[in-house]
């Protein structure tokens, strides 16, 4: 039990996928202008991350390891994630059009989200069991959503702030991200 | 090597098959009318309908949540095509609208206070002592509307005022939004007589600043057989305004107006309206209107 707790705290706060490991920066900056959009993106990423985490672990365990072709890991994982996203998109479109509409363009974007591939590879590197893989993936997804929601909250306020012209838009967003990253550094002493 | 190739090929093959089967089994039927509508849309994605792009507008049309007339660039010819696809009568839709300039005070008519040589933007020109003209309500003649027009329908005339080509104008209202003086107005094509002055100052002042200003003499009001034109309060003064619903385009007010502030344009022929052509020297906005017509 304690092990799982450590995995959760470490993934959400200490090794936050965006703010400590610098993965998935693209959606972090791109989809964090509105709170609603960042929640949607967070939901979509969580969904894909957990599924991809489990599937990549199974493929690694029962295909790549037995045949001693571990060096194909990156290639195989990208293949899995891309197909999975496609499949999820089709299923959602058929069975849950409202959710499909809500996720919109964010869903196909996850195909090229390095956070998904990153977490899948970390899962393997840490030699987790399937249960831990699921918890680990879900925690990282929660960390990603947390970072996105915090960022969008700040950026919505920045809209009203009087920012010098040369700093408006992306520059101030990058500065904000850097400050948030430093703030999250404070969590490193937690465990 | 062989194992690696087989592994990846196997994975790829399995996923390919799953996705292939899934795309068949999970295929979602798209309303064929949406595709048909997409073909007849102007395709300018101008957003004047309030929806993100022509494709979204087509979907909303099929759902019935919007009216065809929201698409200003499409005009009457588009409404007919939409009516054909969705069923219904095109005549229910309103007439085509064009942008009209409510100012005739070009060079030679309007008194200038100084010569503006700054940035060629109306907003910038206005920032210098409210523009170079003595009249603070008229056109500032820097051509922001002309540059904003995606259809090349507004050219700057010799007298410095923009000239709207009513055959090219689609009524998309980009220029209406752009004009800082708010003197471009969308008017139905059948409405030919317009008061082309918005200056509310007393007649003596407005006449002193511009030869073609409304001087509030009320001659139009007295001569109108339909009681359609009135000098009404506007801002800190008053100005003549024509009621479009009552006006019969007789043109008596335009003929009687001592300063020619009321103007009657020749009627537009509907046949020419359909032949949308790109005038020489302007770039094609790629609106698709020529193809649709």
Image (cartoon, coloured by chain):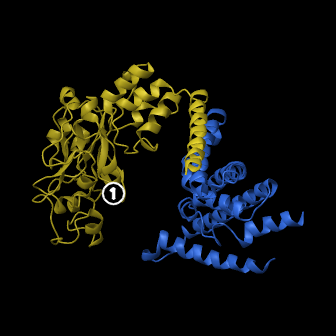
Chain colours: A blue, B yellow
Eyeballing the image, is A10 above or below B62? below
Could you tell me residue B149's position as x and y percent? 27, 49
Q: Is residue A11 left or right of residue B175?
A: right
Give the camera-side residue of B195 and B291.
Answer: B291
Eyeballing the image, is B280 above or below A132? above
Q: Is residue B143 left or right of residue A105?
A: left
Q: Residue at x 72, y 57 (%)?
A: A137
Query: Where the C terminus of chain B falls, by quadrant?
Result: top left
Question: Does the rendering let one see residue A13?
Answer: yes
Could you tell me residue A43's position as x and y percent? 67, 52
Q: Secondary structure at mark 1?
A: strand
Q: Residue B121's quadrant in the figure?
A: bottom left
Give the camera-side residue of B1 and A186.
Answer: B1
Could you tell me residue B170's position as x and y percent? 29, 39
Eyeballing the image, is A131 above or below B72? below
| Residue tagged 1 | B237
Instruction: Name the chain letter of the residue that bears numbered label 1.
Output: B
Question: Does the rendering let one see residue A107?
Answer: no
Q: Is residue B255 left or right of residue B147?
A: left
Q: Residue at x 9, y 55 (%)?
A: B158
Query: Residue reaching furthest right?
Result: A1
Could you tell me residue B184's position as x and y percent? 29, 50
Give the camera-side residue of A57 and B292.
Answer: A57
Q: Residue B210's quadrant in the figure?
A: bottom left
Eyeballing the image, is B85 above or below B217? above
Q: Residue at x 79, y 53 (%)?
A: A130
Classify 10 Å Cα crowding around label 1: few (below 14), some (14-19), many (20 and above).
some
């Amino acid at each position: 039990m304690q092990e799982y707790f450590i995995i959760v705290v470490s993934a959400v706060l200490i090794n936050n996928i965006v703010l400590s490991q610098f993965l998935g920066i693209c959606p972090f900056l791109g989809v964090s202008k509105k709170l609603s959009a960042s929640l949607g993106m967070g939901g979509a990423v969580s969904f894909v991350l957990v599924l991809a985490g489990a599937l990549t672990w199974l493929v690694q365990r029962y295909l790549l390891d037995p045949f001693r072709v571990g060096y194909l890991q990156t290639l195989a994982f990208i293949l899995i994630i891309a197909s999975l996203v496609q499949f999820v998109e089709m299923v959602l479109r058929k069975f849950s059009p409202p959710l499909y509409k809500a996720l919109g363009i964010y869903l196909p974007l996850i195909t090229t989200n390095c956070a998904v591939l990153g977490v899948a590879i970390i899962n393997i590197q840490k030699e987790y069991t399937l249960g831990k893989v699921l918890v680990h993936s879900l925690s990282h997804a929660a960390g990603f959503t947390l970072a996105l929601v915090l960022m969008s909250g700040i950026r919505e306020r920045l809209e009203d702030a009087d920012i010098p012209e040369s700093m408006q838009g992306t520059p101030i967003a990058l500065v904000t991200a850097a400050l948030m990253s430093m703030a999250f550094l404070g969590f490193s002493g937690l465990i | 090597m062989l194992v690696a190739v087989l592994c990846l090929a196997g994975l790829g093959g399995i996923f390919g098959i799953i996705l292939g089967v899934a795309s068949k089994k999970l295929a979602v039927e798209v309303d064929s009318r949406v595709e048909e509508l997409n073909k007849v849309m102007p395709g300018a994605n101008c957003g004047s309908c309030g929806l993100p792009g022509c494709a979204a507008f087509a979907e909303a049309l099929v759902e019935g949540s919007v009216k065809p007339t929201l698409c200003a660039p499409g005009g009457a010819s588009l409404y007919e095509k939409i009516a054909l696809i969705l069923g219904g009568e095109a005549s229910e839709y309103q007439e085509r609208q064009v942008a009209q300039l409510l100012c005739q005070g070009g060079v030679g008519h309007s008194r200038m206070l100084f010569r503006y040589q700054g940035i060629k933007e109306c907003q910038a020109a206005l920032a210098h002592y409210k523009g170079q003209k003595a009249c603070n309500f008229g056109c500032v003649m820097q051509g922001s509307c002309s540059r904003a027009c995606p259809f090349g329908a507004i050219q700057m005339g010799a007298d410095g005022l923009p000239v709207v080509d009513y055959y090219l104008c689609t009524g998309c209202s980009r220029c209406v939004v752009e004009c800082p003086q708010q003197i471009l107005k969308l008017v139905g094509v059948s409405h030919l007589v317009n008061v082309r002055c918005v200056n509310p100052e007393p007649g003596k002042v407005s006449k002193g600043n511009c030869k073609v200003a409304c001087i509030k003499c009320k001659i139009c009001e007295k001569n109108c057989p339909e009681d359609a034109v009135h000098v009404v309060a506007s801002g800190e003064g008053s100005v003549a305004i024509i009621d479009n619903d009552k006006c019969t385009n007789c043109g008596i007010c335009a003929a009687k107006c001592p300063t020619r502030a009321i103007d009657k344009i020749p009627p537009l022929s509907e046949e020419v309206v359909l032949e949308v052509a790109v005038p020489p020297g302007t770039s094609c906005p790629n609106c698709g209107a020529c193809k649709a017509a």
